[in-house]
Image (cartoon, rainbow, N blue to C red):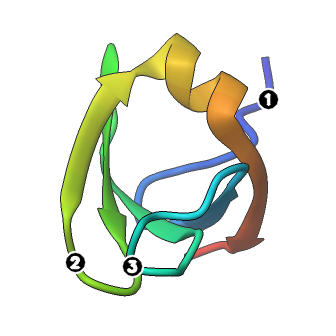
C-alpha cells in the first residue's frame, strides 16, 4: 500500500484550527499521529484512522 503522507510533511486538514490556519506538520507517526499547528504550534495527537478521515491533502512533502 502506498502511503499518501510521511513524517514532517505539511498537510491541510478539513477544518481550520481556532488560530485561523489549517496547515499542520506531522511530527510523529505510529498507531497514533501527532501533528503540530503551523500557526500557533499547538500539538494534537489522534488515532491514525481519525487523522486519515480529517486530512484533506498533502501540501508539502519533506
Q: CA distance from mark 2 to mark 1?
A: 29 Å
Asked whether the beta carbons under mark 2 and mark 1 sit within 8 Å of each other, the answer is no
Q: CA distance from mark 3 to mark 1?
A: 32 Å
Screen quadrant of the C terminus: bottom right
Does 52 sit left or right of 6 as displayed? Answer: right
Does 54 sit left or right of 24 as displayed? Answer: right
Q: Which mark is residue 2?
A: 1
Q: Which residue is mark 2?
A: 41
Q: Earlier in the sequence, mark 2 or mark 1?
A: 1
Asked whether the beta carbons under mark 3 and mark 1 sit within 8 Å of each other, the answer is no
Residue drawn 19% across the image and 66% down it: 42
Between 48 and 41, the one nearer to me in the picture: 41
SS label for mark 3 = loop
Residue drawn 33% across the image and 14% down it: 31
Screen quadrant of the N terminus: top right
Say which of marks 3 and 1 sits in front: 3
Q: Quadrant of residue 51?
A: top right
Few, some or many residues within 10 Å of mark 3 (<14, 14–19, 20+): few
Q: Earlier in the sequence, mark 3 or mark 1?
A: 1
SS label for mark 1 = loop
Q: Which residue is mark 3?
A: 19
Question: Where is 61 relative to 49, above or below?
Answer: below
Residue drawn 66% across the image and 72% down it: 61
Q: Quadrant of residue 40?
A: bottom left
Say which of marks 2 and 1 sits in front: 2
Asked whether the beta carbons under mark 2 and mark 3 sit within 8 Å of each other, the answer is no
Amino acid at each position: 500500500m502506498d502511503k499518501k503522507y510521511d513524517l514532517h510533511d505539511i498537510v491541510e486538514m478539513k477544518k481550520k484550527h481556532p488560530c485561523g490556519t489549517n496547515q499542520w506538520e506531522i511530527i510523529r507517526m505510529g498507531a497514533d499521529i501527532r501533528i503540530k499547528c503551523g500557526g500557533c504550534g499547538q500539538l494534537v495527537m489522534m488515532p491514525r484512522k481519525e487523522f486519515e478521515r480529517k486530512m484533506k491533502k498533502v501540501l508539502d512533502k519533506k
